[in-house]
Image: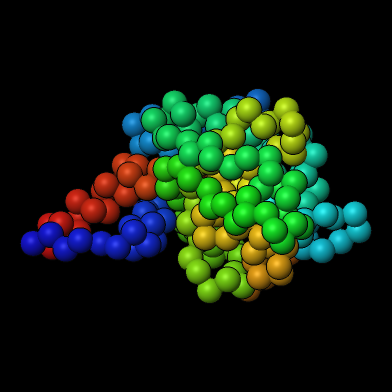
Amino acid sequence: MYRPLSFIAVILLAAQVSLASDPMNGLSKDTPMVVDQRAREIRLLAGLQPDAFGPGWLRQLPGHHAVTWRGGRKSREAMLVTYASDAQVHDALISLGVKPGNNLTQEVWDERDNPKSKAPETRVAGDPLVALVWWEGLKEPLPLEALLRNPTGKRIDLRFGGHKSLIPVWRSGCIICMQSCPGAKISNRNSTMRDYVDGNATFAVNDAIVPAGKRDAVVIVRPVDSKATRDVLDADSSK
């Protein structure tokens, strides 16, 4: 009989579904993104640069930018940099039918150091997503949160924030941020910019999982109701 799964169980099970034997297949610098309408997922050619995610000279927001377009202003602070732009990723998710929240205003960032403002406490809205990462040597992609040390005690809840209108304002290239950020296309609902400023949500690279040094990688983004997730649910319902 069917046994309902919790939201987090769905995400973890979906992350366990293997891709084709070569996730890099079809990706190149000339074709930096593959949009699979049938599977309802996008795959992005990326570079893994774990050292960039932590504190360092002239780094404004360590532990914040998980995935950024390499042409954006914050590419030197991101754990992963993609060859496809943040605008392209936004439009690809729209083409898959994913709905953005578009609820974070510029004040979420501008007022982050103002303890009297409630704006930095706003949590991103939008459809839930799963993010996976693969590099050569892995048998299957890993959930993004497996690559991170999470200080919050809360699961990572990625949402399609959208905020395309803010791209020319920020010019950061941000695709996935670990706190609810108006500059990101996707961000974590369970951590706010106020949490970050208060020092309670600074993520770090999980060096027990992530190898040292730079290397090519693939970032996979799926809606929670993607084909991979549905396949897992169908298999569970037959038990």
Where residue 26 appears, x then y in whole percent?
53, 32
- Within the image, what quadrant is residue 204 found in? bottom right
Residue 104: image quadrant is top right
| Residue 235 visible in the picture | yes
Q: Quadrant of residue 5?
A: bottom left
Position above or below: 199 against 213: below
Q: Residue at x 53, y 52 (%)?
A: 123
Looking at the rendering, in which quadrant would you find the N terminus? bottom left
Question: What coloring was used for the rendering?
Answer: rainbow
Residue at the (57%, 60%) spot, across then down: 191
On the image, the x and y values in percent for residue 95 come to 44, 26
Residue 53: percent from the left, percent from the top? Answer: 74, 58
Number of numbered discs overlaid on the protein picture? 0
Q: Which residue in the rendered view is the most extreme toward the right?
A: 57
Is 19 placed left or right of 118 in the picture? left
Is residue 164 or residue 214 the one in the foreground? Answer: 164
- Residue at 68 percent of width and 40 percent of height: 106
User: Relative to residue 190, is residue 168 drawn left or right?
Assistant: right
The foreground one among 235 and 140 is 235
Q: Quadrant of the C terminus?
A: bottom left
Residue extending furthest toward the front: 116
- Regarding residue 48, the answer to whether it shows in the image is no
Q: Residue furthest left?
A: 1
Toward the viewer: 178 or 207? 178
Q: Is residue 170 left or right of residue 191?
A: right
Instruction: Identify which residue is drawn at 70% across, 58% down.
Output: 116
Query: Quick one: 29 or 106, which is closer to the camera?
Result: 106
Q: Position of residue 143 (x, y in %)?
A: 49, 58
